């Protein structure tokens, strides 16, 4: 189980790095989102994966660690806000410059001279 979990986190990280290094803005946004999913899975795994663990202390011998769960919930909210901001920024840049190429210079002050 741990091997499958770590391979999944590794594949998500590798795919997200590949998408972040692309030249268009939409794959960059998708790559950032996938990287946040990989980080969330990694944070969730730091609480040790347990089956049938009690969420409250004192009811069983084994319990689930609540700290990684709280960190992941916070990261999901922050990741959603960051993704929404990135999409709005990409759409505005596309509207002003006319292309979604990350390295395009035609809409900058140097390109207008």
Image (cartoon, rainbow, N blue to C red):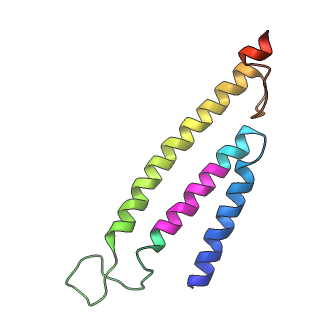
Span colored in magenta: 31-43
Residue 5 relative to residue 94: left or right = left
Q: Residue at x 35, y 62 (%)?
A: 70
Q: Residue at x 70, y 63 (%)?
A: 14
Q: Residue at x 31, y 87 (%)?
A: 62
Percent across and percent down for residue 89 are: 61, 31
Front residue of 41 and 109: 109
Front residue of 76 and 109: 109
Residue 101 relative to residue 80: left or right = right
Residue 104 vs 34, above or below: the answer is above
| Count of labels in the image | 0
Q: Is residue 54 magenta?
A: no
Q: Residue at x 78, y 41 (%)?
A: 23
Determine the residue located farthest toward the top in the rendered image.
113
Percent across and percent down for residue 6 are: 60, 76
Percent across and percent down for residue 32 are: 62, 49
Quadrant position of the C terminus in the picture: top right
Residue 107 vs 46, above or below: the answer is above
Percent across and percent down for residue 24 are: 77, 39
Q: Quadrant of residue 110?
A: top right
Residue 87 relative to residue 57: left or right = right
Residue 110 vs 71, above or below: the answer is above
Q: Quadrant of residue 3?
A: bottom right
């Amino acid at each position: 189980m741990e091997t499958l979990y770590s391979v999944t986190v590794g594949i998500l990280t590798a795919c997200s790095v590949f998408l972040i290094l692309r030249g268009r803005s939409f794959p960059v946004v998708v790559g950032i989102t996938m990287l946040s999913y990989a980080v969330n899975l990694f944070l969730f795994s730091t609480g040790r994966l347990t089956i049938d663990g009690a969420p409250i202390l004192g009811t069983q011998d084994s319990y689930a660690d609540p700290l990684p769960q709280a960190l992941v919930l916070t990261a999901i909210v922050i990741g959603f806000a960051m993704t929404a901001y990135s999409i709005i920024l990409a759409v505005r840049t596309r509207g002003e410059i006319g292309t979604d190429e990350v390295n395009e210079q035609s809409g900058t002050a140097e390109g207008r001279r």
